[in-house]
């Protein structure tokens, strides 16, 4: 059929374009020269398990560091299998690594040298216990060093026998907590290549040939030595399937972490979940009306922790809120292992991927203020400041968070000072200190909006500004998607103030709103995330320490749901992209942003 020939013809073109992309990345990696330099006490080597670093390579690497004025250097092995070199080209992008200081560092997964002070700040002592720990350290070092961080090919370094990029623990860290994209992608691509000649004899055969020669084409200009590259390429399908089986059978550090947490969660859940909730409110926390109606209830779709959560709406002021609300103990339970611990890598990847959002926030603040001291409340790991550090070098940036995120932001150089604890408790000590306060996707997590806005008023100087960004409960997407709309985000989101509610609260707290962004603040992810929620309802995460260990039947069902579910989620992403130009012109969208001045 013509359409099958066209489809596999397009796949052929994509395969060749991908070979060019990966080949360009590999060609960009410089190689160490056979120079020598003396050991330096201020630098320390960190090796992945099983890696042996020749003395000549150490000397050459140190000479490279000195010659180029580097703060740290990551090494890619100079002798490797075709599959490993291809993986290097897929995962190591030197141009992006150099230009984007915010993203986690790329690594060749073998060895790196970095300042001793930085490595010790990460708790390093001896060799990392596993490859996942090595990758975590290598990625974080990139953000903490004060100076250039480079990647180079070490001709004298031989690669690990097994492709390290298919180690389940290391790949999980690299991909933000899940190996699913590779676990599903490898068999899908392989199946397409195998059935191609049957479905489309001409284009399918070309696609299969392109698949087999793709890797040898990509490594031609690489400085990494690959023996018998064409022969290895012809054996690609067998090699890919072997690596895929190793990935599926890998134990990984995440499993060890989960198993270690099982007794902890068993103890936390032994008394049930009733103590995690306050008594059900009978009146609206915003206006005091007793005319409440329940919109929906749903489980924890994000972590799959036990409990069911309801969102009520006031029929008088249209304020929405979680009812019953979580207690402080409940917040601790449901936040645990989401922003840190098991969920840290995934959230770090999410927060680092919203460049335009941070740019919009910065533009809104600088339009109405020239801050000298800036506080970000609920700062997480400080990604907002990471995006503005270079643009406002003279501003003192300070972060506040309940967890250790603010301290991490300071260690990365993104914040000048870290504050830990509740904002309402810290406000008195920080009275009249700041020209600007940002509270982005923070207020919806708090129990008392009035107290939080009063705290913002307290810490700001006269005429200082506060920037707030929260979900918009009046969004047409919320009405269309109902309880599946992602920003309901139960159980973490507690308060949902409309723009009218927020304007009233700001004026009550002593602020005058200056500018609102509603449609302009749209994030274009409503459908993809909401469709993900729908699939999660049927197939929640199985690998969690607060859930029973899954049976093989549950694993099979989970995979069967997510195979078509992945296509459904992809359709949501396409829909978001298509509707974004329209959504940015609407009066309400996924969220709103407001800046107000202290009177």
Image (cartoon, grey):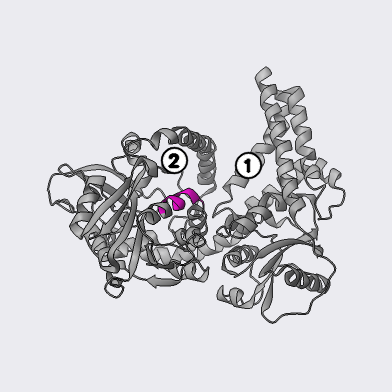
Seen at 17% across and 51% down, the residue is 284
- Of residues 63 and 443, the one nearer the viewer is 63
Residue 32, percent from left and from top = 80, 64
Q: Nearer the viewer, residue 183 or 543?
A: 183
The front one of 567 and 467 is: 467
Numbered circle sitting on residue 185: 1
Question: Split into 4 quadrants, where in the image is the N terminus?
Answer: top right
In the rendered image, residue 410, in percent from the top left (x then y), is placed at 48, 70
Judged from the image, the secondary structure of the residue bearing numbered disc 2 is: loop
Q: Quadrant of the C terminus?
A: bottom left
- Asked which quadrant contains residue 507, the reply is bottom left
Region in magenta:
353-361
Q: Which mark is residue 318?
A: none
Q: Secondary structure at mark 1?
A: helix
Marks counted in the figure total 2
Q: Residues within 10 Å of mark 1 (few under 14, many from 20)?
A: few
Determine if residue 165 is in view.
yes
Q: Main secondary structure of the magenta part?
A: helix
Is 107 situated above or below 323?
below
Is 319 positioned to the left or the right of 129 in the image?
left
Q: Residue at x 64, y 57 (%)?
A: 97
The image shows residue 199 at horizontal and vertical percentages of 70, 24
**Dot 2, crowdedness within 10 Å: few (<14), some or many (≥20)?**
many
Label 2 – label 1 distance at C-alpha:
25 Å
Q: Nearer the viewer, residue 494 or 218?
A: 218
The image quadrant that residue 582 belongs to is: top left
Which residue is most to the top?
Answer: 1
Q: Is 386 situated left or right of 372 in this image?
A: right
Question: Is 436 positioned to the left or the right of 32 in the image?
Answer: left
Magenta highlight on residue 32: no
Dot 2 corresponds to which residue?
524
Foreground tag (2 vs 1) = 2
């Amino acid at each position: 059929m013509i359409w099958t020939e066209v489809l596999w013809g397009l796949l052929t073109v994509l395969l060749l374009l991908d070979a060019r992309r990966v080949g360009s990345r590999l060609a960009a990696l410089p190689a160490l020269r056979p120079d020598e330099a003396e050991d330096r006490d201020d630098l320390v080597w960190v090796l992945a398990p099983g890696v042996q670093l020749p003395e000549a390579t150490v000397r050459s690497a140190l000479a490279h560091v000195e010659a180029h004025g580097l703060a740290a250097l990551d090494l890619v092995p100079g002798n490797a299998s075709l599959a490993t070199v291809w993986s290097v080209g897929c995962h190591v992008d030197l141009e992006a690594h150099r230009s984007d200081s915010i993203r986690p560092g790329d690594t060749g997964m073998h060895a790196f040298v970095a300042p001793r002070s930085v490595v010790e700040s990460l708790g390093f002592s001896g060799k990392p216990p596993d490859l996942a720990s090595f990758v975590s350290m290598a990625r974080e070092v990139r953000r903490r060093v004060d100076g250039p961080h480079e990647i180079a090919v070490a001709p004298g370094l031989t690669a690990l026998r097994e492709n390290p990029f298919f180690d389940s623990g290391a790949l999980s860290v690299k991909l933000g907590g899940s190996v699913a994209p590779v676990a599903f992608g490898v068999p899908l691509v392989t199946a397409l290549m195998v059935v191609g000649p049957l479905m489309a004899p001409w284009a399918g055969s070309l696609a299969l040939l392109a698949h087999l020669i793709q890797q040898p084409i990509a490594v031609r200009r690489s400085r990494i030595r690959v023996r018998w590259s064409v022969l290895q390429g012809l054996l690609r399908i067998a090699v890919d399937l072997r690596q895929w089986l190793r990935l599926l059978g890998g134990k990984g550090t995440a499993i060890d972490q989960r198993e270690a947490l099982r007794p902890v969660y068993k103890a936390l859940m032994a008394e049930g979940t009733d103590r995690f909730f306050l008594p059900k409110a009978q009146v609206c926390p915003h206006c005091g009306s007793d005319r409440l109606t329940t919109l929906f209830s749903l489980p924890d779709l994000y972590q799959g922790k036990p409990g069911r959560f309801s969102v009520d709406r006031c029929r008088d002021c249209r304020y929405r809120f979680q009812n019953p609300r979580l207690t402080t103990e409940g917040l601790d339970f449901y936040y645990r292992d989401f922003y840190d611990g098991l969920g840290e890598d995934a959230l770090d990847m999410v927060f680092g991927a919203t460049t335009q959002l941070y740019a919009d926030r910065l533009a809104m603040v600088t339009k109405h203020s020239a801050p000298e001291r800036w506080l970000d409340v609920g700062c997480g790991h400080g990604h907002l400041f990471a995006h503005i550090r270079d643009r406002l070098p003279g501003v003192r940036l300070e972060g506040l968070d309940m967890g250790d995120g603010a301290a991490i932001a300071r260690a990365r150089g993104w914040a000048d000072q870290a504050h830990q604890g509740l904002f309402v408790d810290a406000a008195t000590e920080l009275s009249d200190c700041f020209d600007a306060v940002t509270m982005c996707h923070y207020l919806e997590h708090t129990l008392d909006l009035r107290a939080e806005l009063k705290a913002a008023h307290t810490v700001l100087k006269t005429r200082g500004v506060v920037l707030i960004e929260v979900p918009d409960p009046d969004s047409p997407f919320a009405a269309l998607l109902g309880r599946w709309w992602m920003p309901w985000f139960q159980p973490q989101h507690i308060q949902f103030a409309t723009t009218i509610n927020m304007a009233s609260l700001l004026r009550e707290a002593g602020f005058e709103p200056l500018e609102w962004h509603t449609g302009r603040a749209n994030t274009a992810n409503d459908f993809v995330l909401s469709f993900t929620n729908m699939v999660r309802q049927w197939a929640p995460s199985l690998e969690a320490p607060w859930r029973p260990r899954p049976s093989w039947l549950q694993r099979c069902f989970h995979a069967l749901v997510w195979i078509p579910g992945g296509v459904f989620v992809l359709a949501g992403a396409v829909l978001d992209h298509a509707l974004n130009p329209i959504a940015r012109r609407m009066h309400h969208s996924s969220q709103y942003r407001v800046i107000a001045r202290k009177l």
